Image (tube, rainbow, N blue to C red):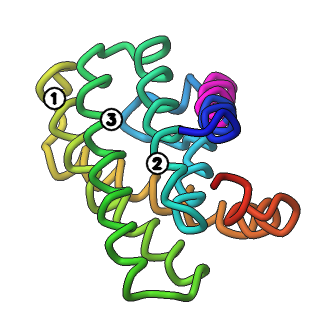
Amino acid sequence: MKVRNMAITALISAMYLVVTMLVAPIGFSVVQFRLSELFNHFIVYNKKYFYGIVLGVFMSNLLLSPVKADMIFGVAHTALSLIIVILMSKVVKNKTWLMVINAFVFSFNMYIIAFMLKMFMGIESHFLAIYGSLAAGELITMLVLIPLAIVINKALKLEKLIG
């Protein structure tokens, strides 16, 4: 990996962590609004953001999550979702539509986080209630962040920023 790519990967993961820290109280419960989910949209512009995003999720869950199993389940959720979107990018070329699909993929896959919360936090709510809450929060957050991702791309040229 080139030094520039390593630096950008480290920067993305650090920014994910910092933004997650800003909203930590509402980023690790049954209702989650993580503004750091913005970085998941970067995968639409270049698949090489995968490593920075996944590392950011791992560090955030390691340092901030009340459930240490989140390091496994949260990373699995993110990696699986990003891989699905990378595969879909071979068919869907419109970046905005791909971000909408990205939001739905991440939301659908929140069953992984719902399972983890049910198993490791002992939340008494019904699994579908937990899943619905998580999926709705993820979907709303990621859809609302699409315009910001577009603005960031226009400013930074995300396609070419990492090579």
Q: What's the magenta region?
A: 12-23
Q: Give the residue type at disc 3.
A: Val
State the image coordinates of residue 145 (x, y, percent, origin top left).
Answer: 66, 60
Nearest to viewer (mark 3 / mark 2): 2
Relative height, residue 10 to residue 52 (above, below): above
Identify residue for label 3.
75
Secondary structure of residue under mark 2: helix
Residue 50, label in figure: 2
Residue 132 or residue 163, whichever sits in front: 163
Question: Within 10 angstroms of label 3, few (less than 14), some, or many (20 or more) residues?
Answer: many
Nearest to viewer (mark 3 / mark 1): 3
Question: Within 10 angstroms of label 2, few (less than 14), some, or many (20 or more) residues?
Answer: many
Q: Is residue 119 left or right of residue 3?
A: left
- Residue at image position (38%, 56%) is 82
Q: Give the residue type at disc 2.
A: Phe
The disc, 3 or 2, on the residue closer to the chain's N-terminal end is 2
Q: Main secondary structure of the magenta part?
A: helix
State the image coordinates of residue 138 (x, y, percent, origin top left).
Answer: 45, 54
Q: Label 3, label 1: how many angstroms apart (C-alpha)?
A: 24 Å
State the image coordinates of residue 160 (x, y, percent, origin top left).
Answer: 71, 63
- Residue at image position (15%, 38%) is 115
The disc, 3 or 1, on the residue closer to the chain's N-terminal end is 3
